[in-house]
Amino acid sequence: MRSEVTTAYGLHHSEYIAFLHSLRSRQLLYSSLRSSTQEGKVKLCIFTNAPKAYGCKVLETLHIREYFDDENIFGVDDVMKFGVCKPEPLAFNKVLEGVGCTEPSKAVMFEDSMKNVRAAKAVGMRTCFIVANPDLHDVGDRPDEGDENVDVVLRDIGQMREMLSCLWRAEWDF
Amino acid sequence: MAHIDRFMPSRSYNNVVIHQFDTLFICKIQPLQYRLHFIKLLLLFIPVFHVVAMSSDNLLTHLVFDIDDTLYPVTNGFTIHRNQDVACAYMIEKCGFKDLPAARAFRNEYFEKYHSTVKALTVASEEGALPKNEDGSDRKFDAADLANYWVEGCKFKEHIEVNPLLIEAIKSLKEVRR
């Protein structure tokens, strides 16, 4: 193969090797540039009490799967390895550890469940409570917008831009 | 104050911090201009410390989203479909529950305690609380099997609508620098 290429293009063997090396170094440069562009950016993460494969399917249906890196998506199967799930505080700690968050106060948890909002606050996270319909809630998880563990309330996740513009400054105003 | 003065460095000492410390403690015997100099420095740095402390308190590095009923509205009926139709169908088909009311009652009881269908069925399996196999042996729950069942069995597109506001928000948040 090597001789075919060098013969076809009239290249000296050493020139061909140098060309291959330049390609390799260019690949390395591009990959390091790609990782450096992700550095210093706010990390978007998922933590669901459902299995990860199912969670990914919902994200695909919503057309937002591509914006979450695979290593930042945590399903119940990821934390059940430690025998826990939401709303156990250890489950939140494991996820924060997994996404490289050393200061929970620099992380916001978006949740529709009061139990999980309370647990997120207990580990030191900021909390955004999504409450669409107070009558539709799971067993034993009645919404309480006035709860002291709720930092901010949204009626719909689509209100983020309007109500939480501070997120686009990577700051928490509440 | 004379005995303190013996342990303090002289005024010509190079280290500013120690010099200020010296000034603070033996101010009675220091000239007036040294005291004013120290106070000016202090006043200069108070707002700087304040700004640094405030900004670092408010900075965000991670946004963590739950999925169900958070990234789509609970009112679209998908959660009821998943929990009542698909999860209970799985419990009847794979876990040996005899009918829908039995599966629903069991799920509700265990979900209230364990907050997740996967954990509820895992614990029930470990406790031997699931209906027995035909040969009388304990039934084992397989979490990966439930995950596949949900992925294959849930009618995602029938209930969940694409939300352009959510897509735009997530896409732009992905580029926010901390």
Image (cartoon, rainbow, N blue to C red):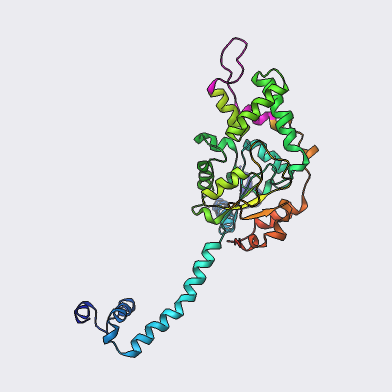
From this view, report whether residue A100 is shown above or below residue B89. Answer: below
Outermost residue to the top: B135
In the rendered image, which quarter is residue B89 located in? Answer: top right
Compared across the picture, whether B56 is left or right of B176 comes to left
Whether residue A19 can be seen here: no
Compared across the picture, whether A102 is left or right of B154 comes to left
Q: Position of residue A137 (x, y in %)?
A: 69, 40
From this view, report whether residue B163 is shown above or below residue B142. Answer: below
Outermost residue to the right: B158
* Residue that appears at 52% across and 48% down: A122
From this view, report whether residue B95 is shown above or below residue A47. Answer: above
Instruction: Assess whether residue B86 is covered by the magenta stretch.
Output: no
- Number of numbered labels in the structure image: 0
Q: Position of residue A139 (x, y in %)?
A: 66, 35
Outermost residue to the bottom: B32
Whether residue A50 can be seen here: yes
* Residue that appears at 70% across and 43% down: B69
Q: Nearer the viewer, residue A125 or A19?
A: A125
From this view, report whether residue A135 is shown above or below residue A38. Answer: above
| Placement of the N terminus of chain A among the 4 image quadrants | top right
Q: Position of residue B108 (x, y in %)?
A: 65, 30
Q: Position of residue A21 (x, y in %)?
A: 54, 53
| Placement of the C terminus of chain A among the 4 image quadrants | bottom right
Instruction: Assess whether residue B148 is covered by the magenta stretch.
Output: yes
Q: Is the magenta region chiefly helix, strand or loop?
A: loop
Q: Nearer the viewer, residue A143 or B87?
A: A143
Please provide the residue range marked out in magenta: B127-149
Q: Nearer the viewer, residue A61 or B64?
A: B64
In the rendered image, which quarter is residue B40 located in? Answer: bottom left
* Residue that appears at 68% across and 47% down: A66
